[in-house]
Amino acid sequence: MDHSSPLHQVSQHLLDFFTMPAGSDALPPLSVRQLGDTIRYNILGLTDNGDLSVSANARFWQAVVAKQRRQLRSGTDDLMPENEELQSLIEQAAMWRFPFKEAKSLPIGRYTLSFQRLPIITHVLTNVLSQAGDYGRRSKTEQSPTLSLTLQNAGVRAGQTPQELRHYRLQVIYNIIRRLAEYSPWRLVEPEDVKKDTIRVHVELQKCTQPELKDHVCLVSGPVVEPVQKTATKMTLDGYLELRTTHMRQVAIHRNGIRQSGISNMDTLMKRLGSAAVIVDLASVRHQSAVTLVRNGLGSSKGASYILYNSARLETLLRTFNDQVKAKVYDPLPPLEEIDLSILEDDLDWEIIYGYLLPFPDVLESLLEQLPQGSCGIHQFVRYIENLAGVTSRYYRHKKVLVQRRSQLSPILYARIYLIMTVRQVLNVVLAVLGIEPVDYI
């Protein structure tokens, strides 16, 4: 994890507030995920549950302080038994990068904490829009730890047909891991450039085809099976692409028809959607587990059509805004530093920014945490983009972005346009890592 990430900094501040080194040999801080329920960051119900909560019981902190060679500052079972101590936390947090607005004690033995929203909103929009495709990417040097990825059992070479779906899934998983590695602390090296401490990962169809070799870990790509019999499918990649393209056409027709503007023809658009659907199908379950073919047009997840439909709505909205600027309906978008971002402190805006955009670098980092043990959380990445698409869809339903041209509404228009631009950027990073080409229209 990037030790400069906002969530990591907040966790470290809280750890320092409640604990202190037990000696001179305290360890480097744990990642957010390693803190478990001691410090829990919320995504849903932020208004009622706070942005995060902290265990009030000293017993739940013992495992954390033991791992860190630290000790609790409080000698009581309750970390902050008095309201004055809660206020002390608020006052100390005022000096942090992201201060708290309030702290409350819950009867379930936890404290809820809520941030001042504007500093985080400003941080997220500024960093996402300035870093663009590099948002969440870790910097690397020649001293960075190295990683070598090898694709095993790849089957037919690229471009040859017919290709079995299990081999295509293997290729998809391998490609996604390579792209994720570009955002990780590791520096990718070729097999001939490995060092003694290089992490060597073989992406394979089955665990260790060469068990006598102990110089690498195996990351297994599971089989592709039929929905009823649960036996290995005989359908080829070309056949499945054709099937899923047909499904995408049916979905597009069902959703208020199909717009073809900007796409040379309908077939091009449908093939792109079909290709995206196949990737999402193959990546939406744990890589080592069997994935079930989608035969009836419905999958276990919301799927590519839902993701790309919401992505296309972002593109359409921003394109409409730019067209309206050219037509002098709206004034040009001012620089971000001139925008009143406090407009985005509303709960739904905050859910997008705090729940999904702020932790995106940590999400990227978490996916490869278990790579040295032969595991990768690609399926969690699919779930992340589906959930982000879902909350963005809710935003459309409840918030009007392209408001009427009135001077008092201009600040709302500009703030929301910048938020939409930020969401689009993060969505496009996820799509690029998954190997999915975004679409402008559906």
Image (tube, rainbow, N blue to C red):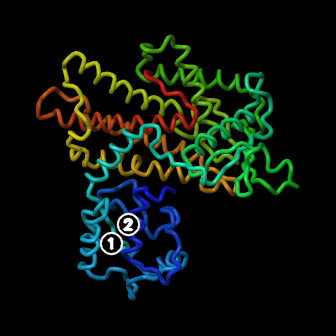
Could you tell me the amino acid type at mark 1?
Answer: Leu
The residue most toward the bottom is 75
- Residue 176 position, x and y percent, is 62, 40
Q: Quadrant of residue 164?
A: top right
Left or right, 73 with reference to 27:
left
Q: Nearer the viewer, residue 427 or 147?
A: 147
Q: Nearer the viewer, residue 229 or 110?
A: 110
Task: Find residue 53 and name its label.
Answer: 2
Residue at 66 percent of width and 40 percent of height: 173
Residue designated by label 1: 106
Q: Local crowd at mark 2 within 10 Å, few (<14), some, or many (≥20)?
A: many
- Residue 260 position, x and y percent, is 45, 13
Judged from the image, the secondary structure of the residue bearing numbered disc 1 is strand
Left or right, 74 with reference to 186:
left
Earlier in the chain: of badge 1 and badge 2, it is 2
Q: Nearer the viewer, residue 87 or 246?
A: 87
